[in-house]
Image (cartoon, rainbow, N blue to C red):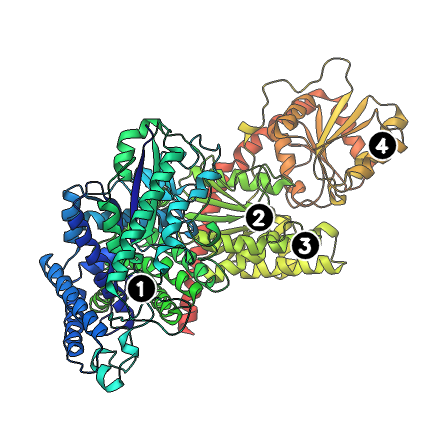
Amino acid sequence: MKEGYFSLVLHAHLPYVRHREPDRLEERWLFEALTESYIPMLWELEAAQVQEALTISISPPVMEMLADPLLQTRYEQYLARTEELLVKEAKRTSATKEERDLTSFYQKRFQKITSFYLRWDKNVLNGFRALQDQNMIRCITSAATHAFLPYVKTKAAVRSQIVEALSCFERHFGHRPTGFWLPECAFAPGIDRILVEEGVRYTFVDEHALLYADPQPGKGSGAPVYSPHGLVLFPRHTRLSGKVWSSTLGYPGDADYREFYRDIAYERDESYILPYIHPEGIRIDTGIKHRRITGQQEEKATYVREWAEGKVHRHAADFVEAIQAEVAQHGGQSDPPYMMVTPFDAELFGHWWFEGPEWLGAVLRAEQAGYRLLTAETYVHRHYRDLETVHVSFSTWGREGYGSVWLNEKNEMLYRAHHRMERDLASVSALYRKQGALEERARKQLVREWMLAVSSDWAFILDGETASQYAEERFLTHLRRFDEIKERLQQQTVEETWLTKIEEDFPFLADVNADLFYSPHDAYIEEQYGNQQRQGKQTIMMLSWEFPPLIVGGLARHVFDLSRMLQQAGNDVHVITADLPGYPAYEVNQGVHVHRVKGAQPRAESFYDWVGSLNIAMYEYARKLARNHPFTLIHAHDWLVGLCATALKARLSLPLLATIHATEHGRNNGIHTDLQKRINEQEQELTAAADRVIVCSEFMKQELQTIFSLPAEKLTVIPNGVDQALIRTETENVLAGGQPFTVFSIGRMVKEKGFHTLLEAAALVKERQLDIRFVIAGKGPLLHEYEQQVLANNLEEYIRFLGFICDEERNEWLQRCDAAVFPSLYEPFGIVALEAMAAGVATIVAETGGLATIIADQINGLTFRPEDAEGLLTEVLDLYSNPGKRERLAAQARQDVQTTYSWPAIARQTEEEYSRCYTEKDDGLKIEKEA
């Protein structure tokens, strides 16, 4: 025998409308829904006395309004005015017999409505709760303010909408529901996970969600399915629902049903109807309607109750037959059995379709031949083992099945504010927790204002262009209130009287959990910051365009080593750097927070333009990051982050420390082009804006004083360092027997690194037939040119270019080589020379810049004049001929690295500069105030 289940689902929702002042037009939305939908629905359900009759979702705004004493009193007054009008109508001498009959009908109806209302202590939630206790219905709820959840930006905000809805339902019904109505049946992957985590077992979606699922369900849309996170999804039965929903073929459009758009308020003389319309003289519906739909014509015939009642029974019978026809076609299904779900807006029944509650009652009382009524919850309880799991994509029951109703050119402006409010809630939760009872109340009110602003009703109304002015007014009201509360929190000007008034204006949800916007990451930051504050440590924002594994020069290695040493010293260090494909946008690397940011123009034609776009993106990212992190200082490395650093200093009012690793003037032995001029100007602006400037050598200090006229007291020399643990020296620095004397070098293939001098030296080696070879690692714009010169001069046996090598390969060559040479024309410091010294390699350097500071000739290495190939070869031959000297120089170099160039020591010196920055920042503020 074929059999199936049928389940009616109703969703009761209205926007939260509750104003201090009476007689708001929009307040009548609730009164009309009570009069025409909720109360008639209750008495039909009571009269039917059917078990498992239907599921009804009651949204938190509706629950809060139904239980609000002020609105209860105003509704009672609304009923009294209507009954008074009906008494006046009964006395109209000009009324026809049909009109008198209708007046009598309405008098009896409103008396019954009033009786029911008072019977449930003016709170119809009591009626729904009683029916649920008798197992006639199952009550569930929806999102806190009916937000369109797929368009909510953050998981925390989605969770807040769900959690607060469940808590609201529990306050009114005494338990948490296991079902949940997604506003607009709008499902998107990920929402299911949050619902399941909060104890929800099932929800409802549109039929096409299952028809396009992956994999396609074996039962099609004839049974619910599990989402990937275990939420049961019941699909809407489109054919059955269409018999009611369809605007052209649906039952509510029958000619004998009551016409919604005709009301006696527009048919009576103004003097007669004036006491019963809006105090400002606006004619508004009274709920007394004497016309039937009739047809398309403008003139409408009188409403005849008997005809309408006859159509109710006829349409109920037709609907039952349609259910039975579906069972006849699909009822052979088993494991799980065939399930038909028809979800509707509750207000359709009664408000829009006056006879709708009577139709519901007739359907429920009909003989269940071939099918049985069953709520979704009971179906899940019985058949949860039989359901398939599928992937379901974004879907709604709205226009065309997706989200165009709630996001289009008429309402798109809402979402930028919505998402900004979410970000603000996250930052407020991170910054203003545990600051006092008043601040805690303000945080909670921020959540309420956000919730009321993101109600999907405002987008829906703007799309439909119905009460657009009110929708925009309400949205802007809550946005303004949100911003005012946030500003007062920031300025610490929250006042008791002011906040109480704000809370009482819209007393929605007695309590909310503002900590839902407080993420585990925020908790971690708070804990770490608390530890730092107790230890006197700092939270540093470090800006560098390169960071491993993005390595262009020595800057990346410097920032990596310095940041991790500062972290090990107890500081909290966040490095903001350029995006690198294949690497995470955020990671914690040896305790350092690394944030990789994609430039605003990642495909810019020029490197200079690319740097500019990177600075814009870094600034926006850092500004947002600062909302959740109590940064104490900005540390910028080189001009490539200068624009971002100076802007952030002004925006965040933080001290700025700049480390200048090299200058454009020094790299090019002067400023010769417009591009070089622009870079030079940016270097000057950065050093001028910085509170302190670090350079890596006395040479660099003198250069900045000369080029930028910086005062000596603003500059501090802190050398670069090297971590000997990263330079393996386990093996002896010798090659296998028979190999030529190998001289290793590494650096970027640009002119200032002086590698052309090595090419000239290699030509001398070839000319003199010496058993010496040069091995050079690194990449850069001149690499191909150098390689071509090697081939052109037949120097392959004497000089070799390796291209880019990783740290491990560098270490291997440092272990294998006999000496290292660094022939730079301009070198602010020379970290590569330090690495060679740390590896225990005898080192030769050009006597320039920072190299001349690191290497003391004949003590810990050898030097030669820049671009002097003959002099370079002389020093190589000195080491080639004197193994004992090589060992002595290498041992002294290694000792110097350990004592002078260790990263722990450099980190301590850097921390001292941070302290000086704070002092000078404070002194600057004092001077400004005095001025």
Q: Position of residue 836 (x, y in %)?
A: 64, 30
Residue for badge 1: 485
Closer to the chain start, of discs 3 and 2, is 2
Q: Is residue 426 left or right of residue 824?
A: left
**Crowd around label 1: few <14 · some 14–19 · many ≥20 (10 Å):** many
Residue 749 visible somewhere in the drawing: yes
Q: Quadrant of the N terminus?
A: top left
Residue for badge 4: 790
Q: Are marks 3 and 4 in contact (CB under 8 Å)?
A: no
Closer to the chain start, of discs 2 and 1, is 1
Q: Position of residue 295 (x, y in %)?
A: 39, 66
Q: Quadrant of residue 470?
A: bottom left
Q: Are marks 2 and 1 in contact (CB under 8 Å)?
A: no
Closer to the chain start, of discs 1 and 4, is 1
Residue for badge 3: 608
Residue for badge 2: 598
Three-letter amino acid code of the residue under disc 2: Lys
Residue 60 visible somewhere in the drawing: no
Q: Is residue 666 left or right of residue 575?
A: right
